[in-house]
Amino acid sequence: MSEPVQIAVIVSAPFMENTLIVHRKGQPECVIVDPGFEPSKIIKLLETRGMQPAAILLTHGHVDHIAGNFALCERFCDLPLIVGRNDAPLLADPLKNLSALGGVSITSPPASRLVGEGDVVDAAGLQFHVRDVPGHSPGHVVYILPGETPMIVLGGDVLFQGSIGRCDFPGGDQELLVRGIRTKLFPLPDDTRVYPGHGPMTTVGAERRTNPFCGDLAGRFAP
């Protein structure tokens, strides 16, 4: 039987963004999900624990989720950078990735692989199944670990505890986002753990029952 998956959460200011370090217990290889504005925290954790990143997975291309890419790719040479194909243009465009709104121009190295619905990413001894869930950004994806008990969703800015991702940025679409949550995430088992890009972990069952934007009581958008 495989060792369980462990996830360390590094919260980066100023947007309190969650960078995730995902690995199988006892294994030195890991995957970094959505490196935020404080890559030094990520590097320190990896070095302290003697861990080696195998890839960077991006749920989407907004600046608070990509700001650490350059530092990590410089520190760990040849580190694969993976993003949803429809968000790839955001990596090189400060207007599209929203950094220009804050008066700075932050970009990322180009992706080494573009992914979409149905793709599988094999890294650090784990299989990440890709699902397209746009609406917060045009090419937002989530990564699911279906072989774990309970299942795990690395969800970015799709589904939060009691909320959903903002849809008022360029390329946002709330109806599309809600439909994606209901069709791609809510069919998963109730105990599926959702690790969001901001805030605490939640579960599929809790959000299906109580989320005011997309849960059973919302009733505003049909899947």
Image (cartoon, helix red, strand yellow):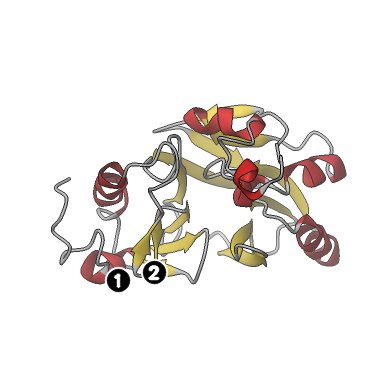
Whether residue 36 is visible, yes or no, is yes
In the image, 102 versus 161, the foreground residue is 102
Q: For residue 88, what is the image quadrant? A: top right
Q: Position of residue 81 (x, y in %)?
A: 67, 36
Q: Position of residue 114 (x, y in %)?
A: 55, 28
Q: For residue 18, what is the image quadrant? A: bottom right
Kindly identify which numbered label has been placed on residue 161: 2
Kindly identify which numbered label has been placed on residue 219: none
Q: Residues within 10 Å of mark 2 (few under 14, many from 20)?
A: some
In the image, 66 versus 185, the foreground residue is 66
Q: Residues within 10 Å of mark 1 (few under 14, many from 20)?
A: some
Q: CA distance from mark 1 to mark 2?
A: 8 Å
Q: How many marks?
A: 2
- The mark that comes first in sequence, 1 or 2, is 2
Describe the element under mark 1 as helix, strand or loop: helix
Identified by mark 1, the residue type is Ala
Identified by mark 2, the residue type is Gln
What residue appears at the point 48 percent right and 60 percent down from the top-left corner? Answer: 196
Q: Are marks 1 and 2 in contact (CB under 8 Å)?
A: yes
Quadrant assignment for the C terminus: top left
Residue depth check, mark 1 versus mark 2: number of the one nearer the observer: 2
Residue at numbered disc 1: 206
What residue appears at the point 70 percent right and 63 percent down from the top-left corner? Answer: 26
In the image, 191 versus 43, the foreground residue is 43
What residue appears at the point 58 percent right and 43 percent down from the top-left corner? Answer: 98
What residue appears at the point 78 percent right and 65 percent down from the top-left corner? Answer: 45
Q: Position of residue 53 (x, y in %)?
A: 74, 48
Whether residue 57 is visible, yes or no, is no
Left/right placement of residue 95 relative to residue 207 reads right
